[in-house]
Image (cartoon, rainbow, N blue to C red):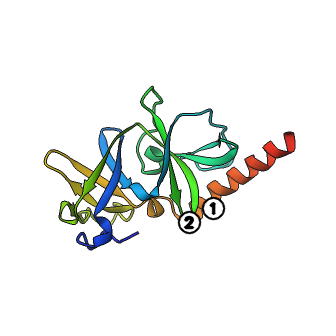
Amino acid sequence: MAQATDPNHPSLAGKYLTFYLAEEEYGVPILTVQEIIGVLAITAIPGTPKWVRGVINLRGKIISVIDLRMKLGLSPVVMDSRTCIVVVQAHGAEMGVIVDQVSEVVDLPREAIESAPNLGAHVRTEYLLGIGKTATKVRLLLDIDRALSQAEMAKARAAATSASSATEETQ
């Protein structure tokens, strides 16, 4: 993904799937989104970080599911009828991301995207591509690969692989 340091980088312009976490609206590039599904039964995997909720069986494929709120340092999601899982491609693997609710797909021209503000040395913003502005809203644009580091993804994939192996052994 392009770095947020250059908001006029042409690859930042484009369509974003927007969704809510707590009271804030976030967006991810639509090309990273595989599908949006309702919340399925999630099987917890012992020994994983708290933000890794577990795994789901998505049409015969086991994928890891994370609580994006917890990953970003927010309170855990409270599941309701609007809660859903956005299946994204991160570091070359499918990952389910729990969000409070999906909002819409927006098309943001490069002039509508600004760099993330510098909030000081102790505030992490490297997972932000930038800030998307429309006439009435501001949206935090996430770089899903940066929000989920390769090491973290490896742990989540290992949990999914372990769960998938256990499922195959019981069949």
Give the vertical position of 132 relative to 67 (above or below).
below
- Residue shown at 19%/60% (left/top)? 112
Residue 159 shown left or right of residue 133 in the figure:
right
- For the N terminus, the quadrant is bottom left
Q: Quadrant of residue 99?
A: top left
Amino acid type, mark 2: Gln
Residue 9 shown left or right of residue 68 in the figure:
left
Cα separation between marks 2 and 1: 6 Å
Amino acid type, mark 1: Ala
The crowding category of the residue bearing disc 2, from other C-alpha atoms within 10 Å (few below 14, some 14 to 19, many at least 20), is some
- Residue shown at 23%/63% (left/top)? 117
Q: Position of residue 168 (x, y in %)?
A: 82, 45
**Total number of numbered discs in the rendering:** 2
Q: Position of residue 157 (x, y in %)?
A: 65, 56
Foreground pick, 75 / 151: 151
Give the vertical position of 40 relative to 11 (above or below).
above
Look at the numbered discs 2 and 1 and tell me whether their residues touch, using CB distance below 8 Å: yes
SS of the residue under disc 2: helix
Q: Position of residue 133 (x, y in %)?
A: 19, 54
Name the outermost residue toward the top: 81
Foreground pick, 34 / 165: 34
- Residue shown at 15%/44% (left/top)? 136
- For the C terminus, the quadrant is top right
Q: Position of residue 83 (x, y in %)?
A: 45, 33
Q: Which mark is residue 59?
A: none
The crowding category of the residue bearing disc 1, from other C-alpha atoms within 10 Å (few below 14, some 14 to 19, many at least 20), is some
Q: Which residue is mark 2?
A: 150
Residue 22 shown left or right of residue 107 in the figure:
right
Q: Quadrant of residue 10?
A: bottom left
- Residue shown at 66%/39% (left/top)? 44
Q: Which residue is mark 1?
A: 154
